[in-house]
Image: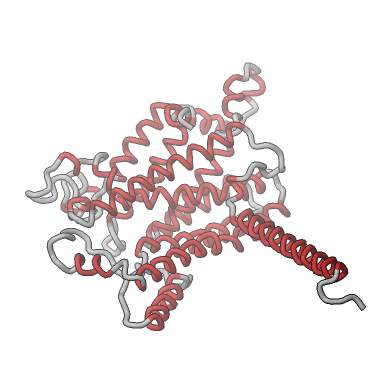
Amino acid sequence: MPQYGSPHDEIENRAFEIVNGLFANALVRGLIRYIKAAIAGLEPSFLRDADIDTVAVTAERKNAISLLDGLRGIACLLVFNYHFIFTYTFQSDYGFGFSEENWHWHQLPYVHMLYSGHIMVDIFFVISGYVLSYKPLKLLRSQNWDQAFHTLASSTFRRSMRLYIPSVVGILCVFLAVRMGAYDFSTLIRFDGQTILGTNEEHPPIFDTWREQLYDVYCTIWALTDWWHWDFYYNNYNPHLWTIAIEFRSSMVLFLVLLALTRIKSRWRIGIAVWLSAMFLRWSRWDVMLFLGGMVMAELDMICGVWEGEKERLQEATDLEKQVSIPLDKRLLFWLYDCEPLWWIVLIVGGYLGSTPNRFPEFTPGYVYLLEWVPDDFIERDRLWQAIGALMMIWSIIHLKVFRNLS
């Protein structure tokens, strides 16, 4: 029998170490592959390198995404401006001429929009409706029914993870910061009555024990993920997550509408979607209207081949017979899409509507008459014209060459 410490034991120990090392390496590699697969599963399909036919994305498609991403980034910056400013003054919510204290140049229409956060949230929702419906609509228009159903099912399943996992992680980070004392001094400032002269946002409560704090976080996350509660929910750990539940519910309505309108012609699908958008807006669901409005914009853009270059090819066609064969309504739509002055008018009008003050627009010069058209039972009456303005601005920016050339 070999003795302890003999060469035979050393060989066995070395072999054991190699096996353990190989097993650990395999485990780590498997874990990395799993994480990569999970991240890939959460990646939005419109950001991937392959289109619906699993071929390379065209240059026009990349420009489309670049333009929408750029608009989203600008909106993020302007929302930051709003949340930074409105802590110290209420003037960010008031329009020019509302009262004797509100005659500043930065409260004028268009300028005021640069730090008014409501319109930027509307822009987020329009872009979300556009990009979420783009791929399913593309498949439906090519009559690829099976792939369209697969895409809708996949999008429905993954939407909650994409929205709620980062939100929950953010809340947990604030929870840890509270327990580490990061909010002790800010809580004193919040109630000193001298620093915060504007909106005093929700603040994390500080409990005596970790158990009480953790239970409060649990209740917060539970309320945040309540999909059936349609009121706006501002939690104490990150009140800006109020849009997450809206994004999820509106996405589900969008997917349901796409599924219900799968096998009908485009003109009927667009007409029904427009009618539903108007109904949701009348019911004060401006958020759902913006998602469905983005869907309508996406399909109209597909009809005219805005991103694929079909419109440019038709304009360059010299075959008279080919142009005559195009239906009159489609030729009219092509003409409208190519009418640059029209889109500038849409942008200017949309910018004015989007500049509707967040507070007391019915008493603000220039908006008094507009608010007379808003029903008395409409919740947050400033939201109606802001939502319509967001649709007009996004649609015009997409079609104006000066902006498309920036992408």
- Where does the image place residue 184, in percent across and percent down from the top left? 26, 70
- Where does the image place residue 363, in percent across and percent down from the top left? 16, 53
**Residue at 21% across, 47% down:** 367
Q: Residue furthest top?
A: 318
Foreground residue, 21 or 277?
Answer: 21
The coloring applied to the image is: secondary structure
Q: Is residue 225 above or below residue 371?
A: below
- Where does the image place residue 167, in percent across and percent down from the top left? 46, 63
Q: Is residue 237 above or below residue 354?
A: below
Q: Is residue 187 above or below residue 198?
A: below
Foreground residue, 325 or 2?
Answer: 2
Question: Can residue 384 be seen in the rendering of this structure?
Answer: yes
Q: How many marks?
A: 0
Foreground residue, 242 or 6?
Answer: 6
Question: Can residue 152 be seen in the rendering of this structure?
Answer: no
**Residue at 69% across, 57% down:** 33
Q: Is residue 397 left or right of residue 307?
A: left
Q: Quarter of the image holding residue 299?
A: top right
**Residue at 44% across, 55% down:** 289
Q: Is residue 185 left or right of residue 80?
A: left
Q: Residue furthest right?
A: 1
**Residue at 21% across, 50% down:** 92
Q: Quarter of the image holding residue 152?
A: bottom right
Q: Is residue 213 left or right of residue 102?
A: right
Q: Is residue 227 left or right of residue 13?
A: left
Task: Give the position of the N terminus as an image quadrant.
Answer: bottom right
